[in-house]
Image (cartoon, rainbow, N blue to C red):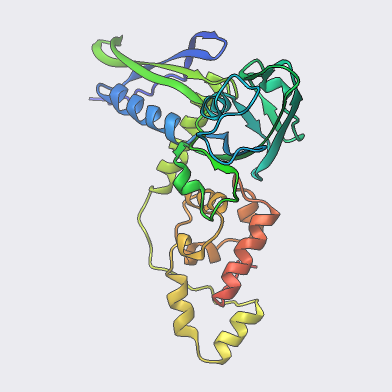
Amino acid sequence: MEYHITLPSKPRVVSEEGMLGIYEIDSLYPGYGQTLGNSLRRIIFSSLPGAAITSVKIEDVQHEFATIEGIRESVMEILLNLKRVHFNLHGDEAQTIRLSIKGPKQVTAADFQLPSQVEIANPDQHIADISGKNSFELEATIERGLGYVPREVLTKEKADIGTIALDAAFTPIRRANYEVEDMRVGDRTDFNRLRVIIETNGTISPREALERSIEIMIHQLKAVVGFQEEAEIPSTRTTKASTEAQSSGDSGDTKDAAKMKIEDLELSSRTTTALSEAGIRSVAGLTRKTAANLKELDGVGDKAITEISEALERLGLSLKD
């Protein structure tokens, strides 16, 4: 009996209206609809990067429970309005945006003074109402991240007096859900059709959110294909540190260092994520790569190569020539 493998279809657009998109994937094996739908939903919520305000400084305000003369909203209400502003941040560096307004005026997100790296997806978002000729000055820090991060995690060092730290919802997704129904494929009627419903905040399109989540899933699965091999130590050492290590009889320490995990190198989170998604989990695996190999990976550029090389050099190791 000849056995034929049935592959699912590519995603099909059911409807796209503004920030809401509905997509279908047909011809999934029985049970695969739930498996794929649940996995995609988790990735969509947890792994798509976004930008959010992480701290705010308002002139003459020391804490979030204060009120401001001449402004209808309390500081707490202003902070809640700021959390509803959706940002696009180009690059990984934190950026500062500012407000400097004199009343009377209804202040919206469009009144922010923005650096070139920052865009606002909903400039009509209300911030505050200024009555009379009072002034309102505000400074906010925008950062890039994943998922939801409480302010206790974001505030690694003691904040300056007057700086108010905020919880940050970085995810650009408002809503993500899926439905599974049976469909006919050949003589069978128990194959699955997966319908995915995605609503974003406008900083990313629903289609792009689905495409990125599928790519992330593929990268993760590729990383676990096959089995780990015993760590190999590159025979050639090119750095000064490695030469010194060999001449001093530290080859045993070098072998131990090569068995370390990538996380132990204390690289930036962006570089660590890029290496992990490419299936590079150990220092030994990293030393088998050339700089040119690493530059082909998403998220790895000249800055990351320098960071990696310096971290390896401290261990007496180097990238492959």
Picture mark count: 0
Residue 5 appears at what percent x and percent y?
A: 33, 26
User: Which residue occupies the foreground of this view, 13 or 140?
Assistant: 140
Residue 315 appears at what percent x and percent y?
A: 54, 75
Residue 153 appears at what percent x and percent y?
A: 46, 48
Dividing the image into 4 quarters, which one contains the C terminus?
bottom right
User: Which residue occupies the foreground of this view, 90 or 301?
Assistant: 90
Q: Can residue 5 be seen in this view?
A: no
Q: Is residue 98 visible?
A: yes
Residue 317 appears at what percent x and percent y?
A: 56, 74
Q: Residue at x 50, y 31 (%)?
A: 171
Q: Residue at x 54, y 66 (%)?
A: 287
Above or below — where is 284 with respect to 81? below
Q: Which residue is drawn at 44% across and 84% down?
A: 252
Q: In the rendered view, does 28 fall on the left or right side of 17?
A: left
User: Which residue occupies the foreground of this view, 96 or 240?
Assistant: 96
Residue 68, quarter of the rendered image:
top right
Spot the residue most to the bottom. Answer: 248
Dividing the image into 4 quarters, which one contains the N terminus?
top left
User: Which residue occupies the foreground of this view, 179 or 215?
Assistant: 179
Residue 38, quarter of the rendered image:
top left
